[in-house]
Every structure is written in structure tokens, then in C-alpha cells.
């Protein structure tokens, strides 16, 4: 049986892709398969727009009989996991750019989709994108939703989280708390998060967690919208668990998110979750919790109705906790392994 090789361009101990591949590797190895992670680094002096074609050459040269699985755009993959969606669609959210990397990405992306034996899409939303933009046959693409390490909800941990956030950030008692988690606020809807909150006519507190290079803009916007006393910019957090625990409503008005593990994480910690139809993970939510777009402020009526009814809010939070149990890393690995096994079987 061929060795399953998870290919990654560079190793980062904080990278979400690395954590996912390591967990997937471990889960598949538990099931008796021979696995490895292959990191291929490029010379630091090399310009970025050359590094990617060079990386493709490196990976394809050493492939031999390995079964290649990757989140990276490479032209010799057995399975490509399109966890980042399509770069072509992503560019539409950025506007005009002279970055020489973009045409290289697009060239690599086209080759990747066309050459991969099979493609895993993290949402129906991304699958439709791939079919529409690159004319890939739908039968070549399987939808496998992401999984997370499901954690049991513990009352003692909840109380400890409230104590921690109260002491460090001034968490208020008996006030509905909103949460936003994401680095790079523009694409993930940081501005729309603040503008939505500014239209709510009831008391609230909110936390924005994540790295943002233009943080001054968002702080100034909160001031301009007269909600600065209600919003805390908590910055990047290595472990945002305590924020999820103390939050009631996770509001994520993203412009483009192929999946969005933060949705699963918020559900795991009993949050009511609201996002946009441009977020892949929104497919697992009821339609009433989906904004048509990041500026769909009509959602405020729904938000305020839950703020007015604590029992209804509690029921929805509990429902999300129950529903997220099926989106475990174990289930993701099982579904992924089914696809790997079917491709290997076809080789015999």
C-alpha cells in the first residue's frame, strides 16, 4: 500500500493548516495506514513569485510512489483539499492589486484543479465556485466539512473563564455578550461587526479577538459609532477558549470564508451563531441565522428578539452544542479516508 504523504510548503507551529494536517495524519495513522508529513522549504533569498513554481518542482520531483495529499496548490497531487477556496474568488474581495504573486497563484491554482485526481471541498459554496470558475466536473469534487477537536462543555471551566475575563477585560454581569474572532478584520467583516452592533438598541458588551495591523481604524470607528465603551479589542489570543465561554452571540459577518472553523468552535462553547452566506460553515446553520451579505443589517431584528428572550437564547445555544458534535476531527478523518481508500482501490 502506498504511503500517504501530507505535503506542506513550510512548517509553522502556529499555522492552522499544519495543525489540521498533523491531526489528520494522526487520525489516519491510528487506522493502520503508513503516513508522513513532508515539509519542503525554499531558499530565503528567492522572490516569493518564484518560490511557488520552485516548490511545485520540488514536490513533484520527489513524489515517486507516494500518495500526495495537500492543502497547497501543486500540480502532481492525488488529493487537493481546497480549504482556502479559490484565489480567483478571493481576489474579488480585495480589489485591484499589482502583487506579482497573484498571477502565479492563479496559474498554479488552475493546474492544481485540473491535474489533481480528486478534490476535497470544505463546503458546497466552494465546490460551486470551483465548478463555475475552472469548469471542473462536479463528480471530481467531494464536499467534506472541516472538523474540530470537540471539547466537553464544563461549568467549572465556564465560571473560571468568567472570572478571568472579568478581571482582565472587565466583563459585565447580566449583559448579552457578542464575540468576533479572526485575524485580518477587513475580509472577515470586522467593520460590519461594529456597524451591526451600533444599530442594536439594547445593552450589550462585545469582544474582538484577533490580529489586525490597522487596529487604529477599527478603534476610531467604534468611537465614531458611539460604541467604544461597549467594545473591547482583546488582540490576538493563543487560546481564545475563555472568550468563547463568556460569549452569548458569535457574530461573524465575513466577506469570504471558504469554511470558518470559528463557527464550529463557537457552537462547541454554546454560542448562538450568526454569519453570512459567504461563509462555508454557514451551510450547517439554519437559514434564519445567515445574513445575505456582510451589510445585511436586517439581521438586527432577529438578534434583538433573542436578546429579549433568555430562554429562547439558551435553547438555541444548547442546540448548537448538540449539533456540533457531528463535526469532530474523527468524523472528518473517516470521510477523508474513505476518499483516499476509493482512489487507492481504483489503482489496483
Image (cartoon, grey):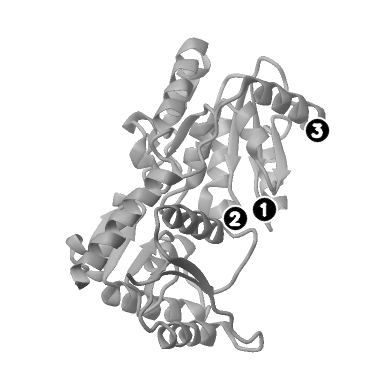
Quadrant in the picture for residue 341: bottom left
User: Which label's residue is closer to the chain start, 1 or 3?
Assistant: 3
Secondary structure of the residue carrying numbered label 3: helix
Residue positioned 52% across, 38% down in the render: 265
Q: Nearer the viewer, residue 222 or 210?
A: 210
State how far apart marks 2 and 3 are (Cα). Answer: 24 Å
The residue singled out by tag 2 in the image is 184
Q: What residue would you read off at disc 1?
A: 211
As drawn, is 273 to the left or to the right of 165? Answer: left
Is residue 50 left or right of 131 when viewed as pictured? Answer: right
Question: Closest to the observer: 331 or 16?
Answer: 331
State the image coordinates of residue 167 (x, y, percent, origin top left). 81, 28
Q: Which residue is mark 3?
A: 168
Dot 3 crowding, Cα within 10 Å, few <14, some 14–19, many 20+: few
Q: Which quadrant is the C terminus positioned in? A: bottom left
Determine whether 58 is above or below 258 in the image.
below
Question: Residue 327: horizontal and vertical position, in percent?
Answer: 41, 40
Given residues 118 and 110, the one toward you in this image is: 118
Q: CB atoms at circles 1 and 3 under 8 Å apart?
A: no
Q: Element at badge 2?
A: loop
Q: Is residue 70 left or right of 206 when viewed as pictured?
A: left
3 is higher (above) or lower (below) than 284: below
Residue at 39 percent across and 71 percent down: it is 3
Amino acid at each position: 500500500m502506498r504511503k500517504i504523504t501530507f505535503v506542506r510548503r513550510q512548517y509553522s507551529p502556529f499555522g492552522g493548516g499544519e495543525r489540521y494536517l498533523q491531526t489528520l495524519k494522526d487520525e489516519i495513522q491510528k487506522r493502520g495506514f503508513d503516513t508522513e508529513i513532508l515539509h519542503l522549504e525554499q531558499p530565503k533569498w528567492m522572490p516569493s513569485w518564484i518560490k511557488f513554481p520552485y516548490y511545485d518542482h520540488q514536490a513533484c520531483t520527489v513524489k515517486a510512489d507516494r500518495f500526495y495529499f495537500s492543502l497547497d496548490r501543486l500540480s502532481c497531487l492525488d488529493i487537493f483539499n481546497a480549504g482556502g477556496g479559490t484565489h480567483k474568488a478571493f481576489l474579488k474581495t480585495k480589489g485591484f492589486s499589482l502583487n506579482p504573486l497573484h498571477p502565479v497563484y492563479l496559474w498554479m491554482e488552475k493546474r492544481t484543479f485540473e491535474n489533481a485526481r480528486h478534490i476535497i471541498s470544505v463546503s458546497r459554496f466552494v465546490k460551486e465556485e470551483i465548478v463555475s470558475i475552472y469548469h471542473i466536473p462536479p463528480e471530481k469534487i467531494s464536499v467534506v466539512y472541516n472538523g474540530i477537536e470537540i471539547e466537553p462543555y464544563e461549568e467549572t471551566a465556564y465560571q473560571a473563564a468568567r472570572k478571568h475575563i472579568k478581571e482582565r477585560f472587565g466583563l459585565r454581569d447580566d449583559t448579552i455578550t457578542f464575540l468576533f474572532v479572526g485575524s485580518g478584520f477587513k475580509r472577515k467583516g470586522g467593520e460590519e461587526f461594529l456597524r451591526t452592533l451600533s444599530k442594536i438598541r439594547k445593552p450589550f458588551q462585545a469582544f474582538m479577538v484577533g490580529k489586525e495591523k490597522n487596529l487604529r481604524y477599527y478603534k476610531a470607528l467604534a468611537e465614531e459609532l458611539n460604541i467604544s465603551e461597549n467594545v473591547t479589542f482583546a488582540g490576538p489570543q493563543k487560546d481564545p477558549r475563555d472568550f468563547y465561554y463568556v460569549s452569548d452571540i458569535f457574530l461573524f459577518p465575513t466577506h469570504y470564508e471558504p469554511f470558518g472553523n470559528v463557527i464550529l468552535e463557537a457552537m462547541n462553547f454554546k454560542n448562538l451563531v450568526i454569519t453570512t452566506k459567504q461563509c462555508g460553515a454557514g451551510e450547517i446553520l439554519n437559514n434564519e441565522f445567515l445574513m445575505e451579505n456582510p451589510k445585511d443589517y436586517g439581521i438586527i431584528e432577529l438578534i434583538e428578539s433573542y436578546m429579549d428572550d433568555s430562554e429562547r437564547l439558551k435553547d438555541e445555544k444548547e442546540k448548537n452544542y448538540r449539533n456540533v458534535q457531528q463535526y469532530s476531527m474523527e468524523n472528518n478523518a473517516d470521510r477523508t479516508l474513505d476518499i483516499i481508500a476509493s482512489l487507492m482501490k481504483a489503482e489496483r
